[in-house]
Amino acid sequence: MKLKQVLFFVLLFFAVCNLKAQKDSATIKLDEFSLSILKVKDFSKGYSSILISDSLVTKNIQSLTDILRFNSFIYFKENGLGMVSSPSFRGTNASQTAVIWNGININSQLNGQTDFNIVSANSYDNITVRSGGGSVLFGSGAIGGTVHLNNKITFKKALKNNLLLKYGSFNTQHVSYDFVKSDAKNYINIGLGYNASDNDYKYLNSSLINENGAFYNYNFDVNYGHKIDAKNQLKLYSTAFFAKRDLSRTLNAPSNDAYKDISLKNLLEWNYFLSKKEIITSRISYLFDEFKYYDNKENLDNFSVGNTKRKIAQVDYNNRLSRKIKINGILGFESAKAEGTSFLTHERNIFSAVFSLNHQLTNRLSYGVQFRKELQNQFDVPLLYSLGIEQKVNKNYTVSFNTSKNFRIPTFNDLYWNPGGNPDLKSENSYQFEIGNSINYRKFHFQVNGFYIKSSDLIQWKPNEFGVWSPININATRNVGLEFSTNYKTVFNDHSLAINLNYSYTDAKDLETDKQLIYVPKNRANILVDYAYTNFSMYYQMLINDKVTFLVDTIPAYTVSNVGFNYQFSNIKNKPNIGFKINNIYNSYYQNTLNRPMPGINFQLTTNLNF
């Protein structure tokens, strides 16, 4: 790390911080300020995003995988129900989708990805899926898109208790409790969650059952806020997640192995309001992740283990200079340490500087630019950039464009795994272009985005000349595709009807072989029809997935549908809600990972109590 470069970015940051705000009516609502949500909203010009509502979360509360599978463009390959779940966003691989927890990138420092079945689905107030490259704002791995998991702390008088109970086929159980108490000075939120299942479903078209598939997990969350005075707020976000899974058998072989995960995340945030539109936020975060793998679950004394410890510090300056101009500057430092059975102890340190500008040039034309530079002790990361433009053609139609340069640094596993690690790896680099069209007409909303991604130096594990799997940088890949979404909502008398549709086409190829990348469906769609009449509601979900390739094999296309019913007892105190859901109503045989079938028809009963 060169001293001149460090000094340059420090001076640039403080120069930005000392810009004087113009006298204007543009303000930030202090009681509702959320830095992480603000970044997605204010500095994603030209990018599209999907907000997952509370009702959509409740329909698929058992796992974050199902929430996103049925309500976003992301394809998931899941090694059986509840097992390891890896995303593919716009045809990119699992380590090229970044998961952002309250503004912190939480992708594993070991394998570079997030297992969406070991992230609590009931711990967040806001889940947003942002399409497209986001490495400038969100760091390594944000190439295909980002998933944002946020908690909102507000200083308004409230007292809430919510208890959600679910029981279903295969002895599947879910219990979650959420408590909120707040006033003008303090906010406290406590959340508890438990999921478990014997998960012993029958493999359709086979005499086998899902042996060794049982799992359980539980989480404990605390979010606390304190308004010290009119200019100072302290916020604490903390979550603990523990999981144990037996790893399911395949169609070809039994299994007796198991996996344990521990994840602890803590973030302390201090918001200092220089004015109603000028804020400095200081953040300190500590994250701990550990896995234990047992190749024989009957012998718990024999296992392999790996863990990472991350310490992150940031100073974040946000200013609405006027009604038309917003700026943001970030200085950050991160220290990561990894220890494990299959690698020695290793560390990396990263210094980062980010600058963002959002400018409403005219009443109809606006743009946003961002730059990021990282200095670290292992890799030379290039200057990253992002440019987004939006042109409002008329009151119903908006056209947008964005382009960005993104990256992913090699993980500790890539570099140091024994045997096979490759310390000579280079960072992955990606260039991206996107054109979007947004139409709002009466009760309809249409969004169509075409994208192009060109990536080089991709990291791929292959057998070397000694037969040992080892990562290498391979030739370029090219992803071209289209995302289309539409929403319709109407209310008439005591009736309401909502229809959501997401469809994506992805052509993702290895430019050396000219073949479609593995585990990338060309066509994919999900549909939700939601109808309500007074206290009764019902919904229908459908997922359509094209065939995918895996080496020389092909996983067939499939369609799976769910239907659910809910009734709210308005004449009983606190108006409890009872629900019944049938998953895979047509008993379709399908798998999204080779030789790992998913369940046939199964049932779920829900009780939701507010008091």
Image (spheres, rainbow, N blue to C red):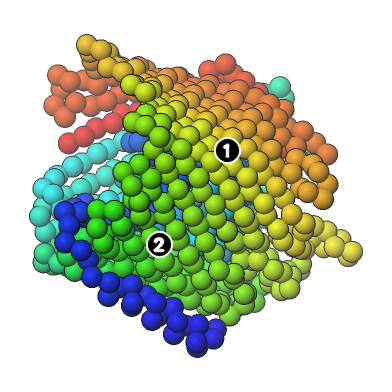
Residue at image mark 2: 356
Which x, y percent locates residue 375?
A: 53, 77
Q: Mark 1: give few (<14), some (14-19) or many (20+) Cα within 10 Å.
A: some
In this rendering, the answer to whether 253 lies above or below 428 is above
Relative to 607, 557 lies left or right:
right
Q: In which quarter of the image is residue 253?
A: top right
Which x, y percent locates residue 243?
A: 49, 51
The front one of 555 and 436 is 436
Which circle marks residue 50 in the picture? Answer: none
The quadrant of the image that shows the N terminus is: bottom right
Q: Please name the amino acid that badge 2 sits on.
A: Ser
Mark 1 → mark 2, Cα distance in angstroms: 24 Å
In this rendering, the answer to whether 404 lies above or below 484 is below
**Residue at screen point 24% across, 17% down:** 535
Which x, y percent locates residue 309?
A: 49, 71
Q: Quadrant of residue 295?
A: bottom right
Q: Please name the amino acid that badge 1 sits on.
A: Gly
**Residue at screen point 55% across, 34% down:** 483
Residue contact at pointers 1 and 2, CB within 8 angstroms? no
Relative to 196, 510 lies left or right:
right
Which circle marks residue 450 in the picture? Answer: 1
**Residue at screen point 24% across, 39% down:** 162
The front one of 505 and 583 is 505
Answer yes or no: is residue 219 visible.
no
Element type at mark 1: strand
Answer yes or no: is residue 371 visible.
yes
Which residue extends farthest bottom? 3
Earlier in the chain: of badge 1 and badge 2, it is: 2
